Amino acid sequence: MGTKSNPGFPVAVLACLFSGLMLVAASCSDDNTTKPKSTKTEVIELSDSAVDFSADAGGADPAFQVVTVSNTGPGTLSDLSVTISYGSGQSTGWLSAILTDTTAPADVTLQATTGGGALAAGTYDATVSVASSKANNSPQNIAVTFYVSARYGNFDEFAAASAHDSNVLLGSRITIPAASTLTHLCLIAKAAGPQVKVGLYTDIGGNPGTLVAYTLATALVAGRIEIPVSETALPEGHYWFMAVYSAPASVGVSTANPAAAYKYASHAFAAALPATFPSALQQTGAEFNYYIKARVP
């Protein structure tokens, strides 16, 4: 008998058909190309992903801060580099980032500067990118925020020392030129010992009005005393910085301006500061080392 010819499919194709749909897709495709896997096995790890600095406008620069760069991958993390980018439309050049080594572990030393007082009060943002051609998660970023606080009032120390009586709520007016967020009520004491309570009042017709922020009793030390308070939004305008002492106390005072006015009222130190300032008496001829610290946009 003669051999019958196979009217069906070639053997190779039949084998593919019987292997199942997934095997057909894998073995019988015209495209046998596979994508190469990444050979980058190192992983950048940062000890901090966000860093904040604070300074006073015209004041000293803050201390530097360090972020550590390590490798959580199996090999050696080398070829490290850092770059800085600044917030859109903001001042630049106020931040430096120095890498101690190009191979992990290494440190990134961050330093913010007001440029000798050239950087105005405000909030500034920058991003420090830590990169490596060897890492599979490059770059990794550090968000940096620099709060440059405004100071309003008499923050330059006067040479003379006052002689404040106890149980008298006394102070002078401070002008805030732009909307700000109050962070500290501050004074410069000439001697340690007594306690102080400070209140910030609105201005109503040239007199202290409503209490908007205050401190608890705080012991005086000689020098600057910057007492943090609950952050409070302050619209532009006039305010009264009023302080009461538990015993006779001394702060910086200037008598250079005979027209400088201060207001006062009797008030027991042990009592809470009044929510509305009582009827105030006035004297002239003295300014005190009273000031506030505030953040501005």
Image (cartoon, rainbow, N blue to C red):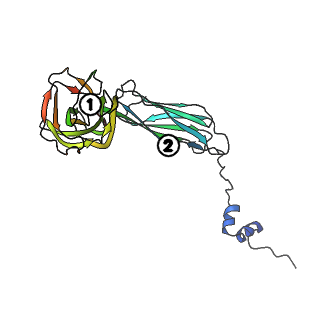
Q: Position of residue 293 (x, y in %)?
A: 31, 35
Which is more foreground, mark 2 or mark 1?
1
Q: Tell me where residue 158 sits by quadrant.
A: top left
Q: Secondary structure at mark 2?
A: loop
Q: Nearer the viewer, residue 181 or 11?
A: 181
Q: Which residue is mark 1?
A: 249
**Residue 231, image x, y percentages:** 31, 43
**Looking at the image, is 280 positioned above or below residue 119?**
below
Q: Is residue 17 left or right of residue 127?
A: right
For image coordinates 31% across by 28% down, the residue present is: 191
Residue 118's quadrant in the figure?
A: top left
Viewer-proximal residue, 275 or 248? 248
Q: Position of residue 22 (x, y in %)?
A: 66, 66
Q: Residue at x 67, y 53 (%)?
A: 34
Q: Nearer the viewer, residue 283 or 259?
A: 283
On-image quarter of the N terminus: bottom right
Decide which of 216, 76 is in the foreground and name it.
216
Q: Earlier in the sequence, mark 2 or mark 1?
A: 2
Q: Residue 239: in sight, yes or no?
A: no
Q: Are marks 2 and 1 in contact (CB under 8 Å)?
A: no
Q: Secondary structure at mark 1?
A: loop
Q: Residues within 10 Å of mark 2 (few under 14, many from 20)?
A: some
Q: Amino acid at mark 1?
A: Ala
The percent coordinates of residue 100 (x first, y second) are: 58, 31
For the C terminus, the quadrant is top left
- Quote the CA–CA distance across marks 2 and 1: 45 Å
The numbered dot on residue 49 is 2
Looking at the picture, which amino acid does disc 2 mark?
Answer: Ser
As drawn, the residue found furthest toward the bottom would be 1
On the image, which quarter does residue 204 sit in? top left
